[in-house]
Image (cartoon, rainbow, N blue to C red):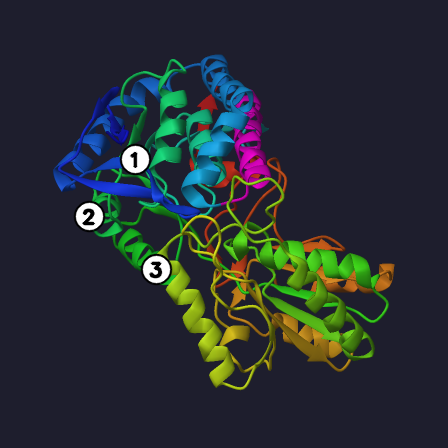
């Protein structure tokens, strides 16, 4: 019998009203397990449990919250190899990347364990004699967390950890493609000593579970990572109820290669940023903007490097690119490849389905030469597809980089300190990388973008306090 992954509500493991199936995208004959799906009533139970637990957890000591989060982080790190194998099997990320993600999730919990002890306020003198002013931060309350499938341990970690660290209670809805990872994380959290109701896991569709969470009058804040249309719907619903909302909704990230760049370094930045994690990350550098003098040389080196990438089973040693996560996403990526060709973009290599020892969603990484108006150069594809755009000079490259409705991450490859400084200041993105792949930031620094990529306060690092706490000003007459 396949393993059954259950909800965790008010300190108890529960089944749902229906079942879904999680399968291995590297081997379609391998069923990872079945998972419970909740209905609106079960989701409301989870929200109510979080609401009932909020006062006691908000009043808990910073030391108590430190101990809980530190224990979670320690177990994640101790079990990183086991969790990495589970992640690679369920989501299709290569084993080294998956193990690193499990390690990162543990580091995030340990960082926020420390933040529980570091929450600061201010004490100020009033303009009136004999009056003191205190500015403190307090928990928001019940926080609904809705996460995607592409980072099934790290993204939940960087939402759950700060929520708990600063005294909030949590209702967590993961993507339906990764229930095993969500339940593994929930099991670790359940063993940490949290009171019942402080953390709740509810699985199911966004239309049912997610919408019920968003609409609940007991939910005080909503943090969502996913698609633009869903994020916009959440923003409208949250605005109508006047609750805090935080959205991360993707990107179409540029990597600029200037004429003075180290070309080999630039090629590696492009390959890692565009194709690793099968290109299934919002920080992927899918627009490669290259200055004219090095355009031809860069394209030739990049094409050869992309052709050499090893696509295969996520658990197989030596695999660099795993499968696309599921059949639906694979179809979407292939449609974009056909759109690119139909609009006149030149497909230099890749884009075809691949056969391996096991049946899986294998796709050869695709590289295009494109024009700025092509859809593949403007819309997020979320797969192993990148396009190269030619820039006349550095100013043109900067204009092309900023010519997008998104603004999550951007990169530049250059050996000029002057150009690096200029691009860091002028790129319209929340995060900028110089001579590094666009993907990935450290656990202790803020994550987030501008324009259509993000809304609300930043995630991660001490900046996360802006979302997970609310500020109170208190006056005292001595």
User: Mark 1 highlights which residue?
Assistant: 33
Q: Taking 42 as reference, is 75 above or below it? A: above
x then y, percent, for residue 440: 61, 46
Relative to the observer, which residue lies in front, 91 or 221?
91
Spatial CA distance of label 3 from label 2 is 20 Å
x then y, percent, for residue 127: 56, 34
Front disc: 2 or 1: 1
Relative to the observer, which residue lies in front, 190 or 3?
3
Q: Which residues are magenta?
A: 93-122
Local packing at callout 2 (Cα closer than 10 Å; few below 14, some 14-19, many 20+) is: some
Tag 1, which secondary structure? strand
User: Mark 3 highlights which residue?
Assistant: 328
Q: Taking 213 as reference, is 201 above or below it? A: above
x then y, percent, for residue 181: 40, 34
User: Mark 2 highlights which residue?
Assistant: 208
Main SS of residues in magenta: helix
Tag 2, which secondary structure? helix
């Amino acid at each position: 019998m396949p393993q059954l992954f259950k909800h965790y509500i008010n300190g108890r493991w529960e089944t749902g009203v229906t079942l879904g199936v999680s399968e291995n995208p590297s081997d379609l004959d391998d069923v990872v397990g079945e998972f419970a799906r909740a209905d609106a009533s079960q989701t409301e139970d989870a929200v109510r449990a979080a609401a009932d637990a909020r006062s006691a957890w908000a009043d808990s000591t910073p030391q108590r919250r430190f101990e809980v989060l530190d224990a979670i982080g320690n177990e994640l790190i101790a079990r990183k190899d086991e969790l990495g194998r589970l992640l690679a099997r369920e989501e299709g990320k290569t084993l080294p990347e998956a193990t690193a993600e499990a390690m990162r999730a543990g580091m995030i919990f340990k960082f926020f364990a420390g933040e529980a002890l570091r929450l600061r306020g201010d004490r100020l003198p009033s303009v009136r004699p004999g009056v003191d002013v205190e500015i403190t931060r307090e928990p928001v309350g019940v926080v609904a967390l809705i996460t995607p499938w592409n980072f099934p341990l790290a993204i939940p970690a960087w939402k759950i950890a700060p929520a708990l660290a600063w005294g909030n209670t949590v209702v967590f809805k993961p993507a339906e493609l990764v229930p095993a990872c969500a339940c593994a994380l929930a099991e670790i959290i359940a063993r940490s000593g949290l009171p019942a109701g402080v953390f709740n896991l509810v699985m199911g569709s966004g239309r049912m579970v997610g919408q019920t969470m968003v609409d609940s009058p007991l939910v005080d804040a909503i943090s969502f990572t996913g698609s633009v249309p869903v994020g916009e719907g959440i923003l409208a619903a949250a605005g109508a109820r006047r609750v805090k909302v935080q959205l991360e909704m993707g990107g179409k990230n540029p990597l600029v290669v200037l004429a003075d760049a180290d070309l080999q370094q630039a090629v590696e930045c492009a390959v890692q940023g565009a194709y690793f994690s099968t290109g299934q990350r919002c920080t992927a550098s899918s627009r490669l903007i290259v200055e004219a003098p090095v355009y031809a040389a860069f394209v030739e080196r990049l094409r050869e490097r992309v052709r050499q990438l090893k696509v295969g089973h996520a658990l197989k040693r030596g695999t660099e690119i795993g499968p696309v996560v599921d059949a639906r996403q694979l179809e979407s990526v292939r449609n974009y490849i056909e759109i690119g060709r139909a609009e006149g973009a030149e497909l230099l290599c890749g884009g075809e389905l691949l056969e391996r020892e096991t049946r899986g969603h294998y796709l050869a990484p695709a590289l295009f030469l494109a024009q700025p108006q092509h859809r593949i150069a403007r819309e997020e594809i979320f797969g192993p597809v990148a396009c190269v755009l030619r820039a006349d000079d550095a100013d043109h490259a900067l204009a092309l980089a900023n010519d997008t409705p998104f603004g999550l991450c951007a990169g530049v490859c250059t050996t000029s300190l002057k150009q690096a400084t200029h691009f860091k200041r002028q790129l319209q993105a929340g995060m900028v990388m110089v001579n590094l792949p666009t993907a990935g930031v450290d656990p202790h620094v803020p994550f987030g973008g501008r324009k259509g990529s993000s809304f609300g306060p930043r995630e991660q690092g001490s900046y996360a306090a802006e979302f997970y706490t609310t500020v109170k000003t208190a006056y005292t007459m001595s």
